[in-house]
Amino acid sequence: MKAFLQHMTSLTGQRDHALLDAALIAALEEVTAARGVRKLEVLRVRDEVRLKPSSCQLHVCVECAASECSQESEPLDAELAAAVRHQHQSSAQKTTPDGDRILWLLVWLDGCFSACLELRNPVVGDSKVLEMAHAFIAIYTNHRNLLDYSQRDSLTNLLNRKTFDQNFSKALRSLARQDATSALPLEERRHPDAGRNQWLAVIDIDHFKNVNDMFGHLYGDEVLLLMANLIRSSFRPQDGLFRFGGEEFVVLLQAAELNDAQRIFERFRSNVEQHHFPQVGQVTVSIGFTHIGLNATPVVILGHADLALYHAKTHGRNQVCYYEALVAAGELKSEVSNDMMEFF
């Protein structure tokens, strides 16, 4: 009972989705003595339901923090798909050819299958253990609903502008901590991704007003929903994905090098261009991104990405523009006025 109360306190004390997920995984690992627990997010693309790992394990591994680790989505197992078809079924299980037992605990949010916790070889012979695991899922679901209500955009379910403001400030503080540890030997660093770069991108749907004018706002909303799905499938769970307002989205990306960030954003642009939007047909996006520096303020960083986006929009659209490259090429010029603002 003491362990249960401690984990319940940990779950309900979180105000961050990633930390809430980590607290749930920790609780299930301890209670069920599972050999491994991972959270799988539901991804819906072209009427197909797939699962995408939200993290490898409780602690983010170096491999999955690397830009080359794509965290590809995977189809539902037959046993799990059958449980989903029976609305609100709480669990499913199977035995693998290797003899491992897999137990899925399903998470339902607003009547929809939202995620599941996959436990490998859990010890749940005692019915009380399984009841406790389901109790953790219920507490998690209730608390997640409260967080989503205040932190997520109601249409796309991406994080909203208010949450971006909070998370961006947190990201800048994290960068400062990483900079302080980057001089240490690798084995002494507390953060496995210390010293890695972060980038901010602003994504804008090209000619979105024409979509609303020609097809109506219902199809416009469908384009926004499908765009949000493409964003989720093109970036990793640990990247910050936000709807900024209207047809504009923001991504906070972790990538080792500029070439990695450029390739990731270009891949997303291509994914959108090749996607068929019902009734509307082809839709494209323009992207402006910038490096998140240690000494810059949020206003200046966001302004840089906006300027790169404006350049992309006024030079043909459907392209990715990097602010620092535009400045180096003389296509943008800036004069620093003070610590809070730059004039262009």
Image (cartoon, rainbow, N blue to C red):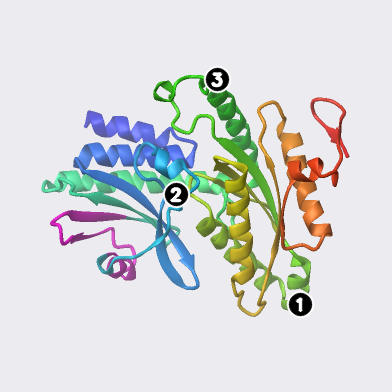
Residue sitting at x 21%, y 47%: 131
Identify the image quadrant of residue 60: top left
Task: Choose between 98 and 215: the one closer to the eye.
Answer: 98
Q: Amino acid at mark 1?
A: Met
Residue sitting at x 33%, y 48%: 38
Residue sitting at x 49%, y 36%: 15
| Sequence order check, earlier mark of 1 and 2 | 2
Identify the image quadrant of residue 3: top left
**In the image, residue 325 lies at what x, y percent?**
75, 44
Where are the magenta residues, as a range? 80-105
Which residue is denoted by mark 1 in the rendering?
214
Task: Choose between 65 and 32: the one closer to the eye.
Answer: 65
> Is 133 on the left-hand or right-hand side of 43?
left
Give how far apart the Cα atoms at labels 2 and 3 are: 26 Å
Circles 1 and 3, Cβ within 8 Å, touching? The answer is no
Residue sitting at x 70%, y 42%: 290
Which residue is denoted by mark 3 in the rendering?
180
Give how far apart the Cα atoms at labels 1 and 3 are: 53 Å
Q: Is residue 292 above or below residue 314?
A: above
Q: Is residue 246 visible?
A: no
